Amino acid sequence: MFLGEFQHSIDDKGRIIIPAKFREALGTDFIVTRGLDSCLFVYPREEWAHLEQKIKSLPSMAANARAFSRLLFSGASECEWDKQGRVNVPNHLRDYAKLDKECTVIGVSSRVEIWDKATWEEYSRQSADSFNEIAEKLVDFDFNF
């Protein structure tokens, strides 16, 4: 399980250090793809395979399912660590997430997310302001905590 929030920089070549405890859980090779809300999703191979099966089960005749599948898979990149424990984020993914210098790396249960620091701070602030409302809406999904 991935937990926590960490601040890191991305260098001019697009390399970013991922926290050691995340690297261990991600394995030697993993998938980086477009995420939601202008961030990147990083999946261990096993979790990616599970997600792939779910997406394959979506109805191919549904335009939204096709669009989601195309964007997720076409943006995906197989990645691995360099000797310093960094991942080289491909240009198209850096552009998508607007990663420039300062980044926030967060653990979200089964995946890691990479955010532009300012984008994460704004998203986090807005979400924190409505945290109670969001939690109340989750009751509709039979979720209680």
Image (cartoon, rainbow, N blue to C red):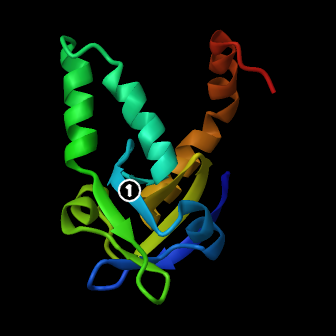
Q: Residue at x 65, y 25 (%)?
A: 133
- Front residue of this view, candidates 61 and 108: 61
x 22%, y 62%: residue: 95
Q: Outermost residue, bottom direction?
A: 84
Q: Is residue 20 left or right of residue 89?
A: right
Q: Position of residue 60 (x, y in %)?
A: 21, 16
Residue 62 vs residue 26, the one in the foreground: 26
- Location of residue 30 in the rendering, given as x and y in whole percent from the top left corner: 42, 60
**Quadrant, the C terminus:** top right
Q: Which residue occupies 39% across, 71% down?
A: 80
Q: Is residue 26 positioned above or below 1 on the image? A: below
Quadrant for residue 90, please give it.
Answer: bottom left
Q: At 72% from the left edge and 19% from the top edge, which residue is drawn? A: 143
Taking depth in this image into account, of 17 and 60 the one nearest to the observer is 60
Number of residues whose C-alpha sits closer than 10 Å to that of mark 1, classed few (under 14), some (14–19) or many (20 or more)? some
Residue 86 image point, x, y percent: 44, 80
Direction from residue 110 to residue 40 in the image, left or right: left
Residue underneath mark 1: 31
Q: Residue 13 at what x, y percent from top left? A: 26, 84
Image position of 38 with respect to 19: above or below: above
Q: Secondary structure at mark 1?
A: strand
- Amino acid at circle 1: Ile
In this rendering, the answer to whether 5 lies above or below 63 is: below
Decide which of 73, 97 is in the foreground and name it: 73
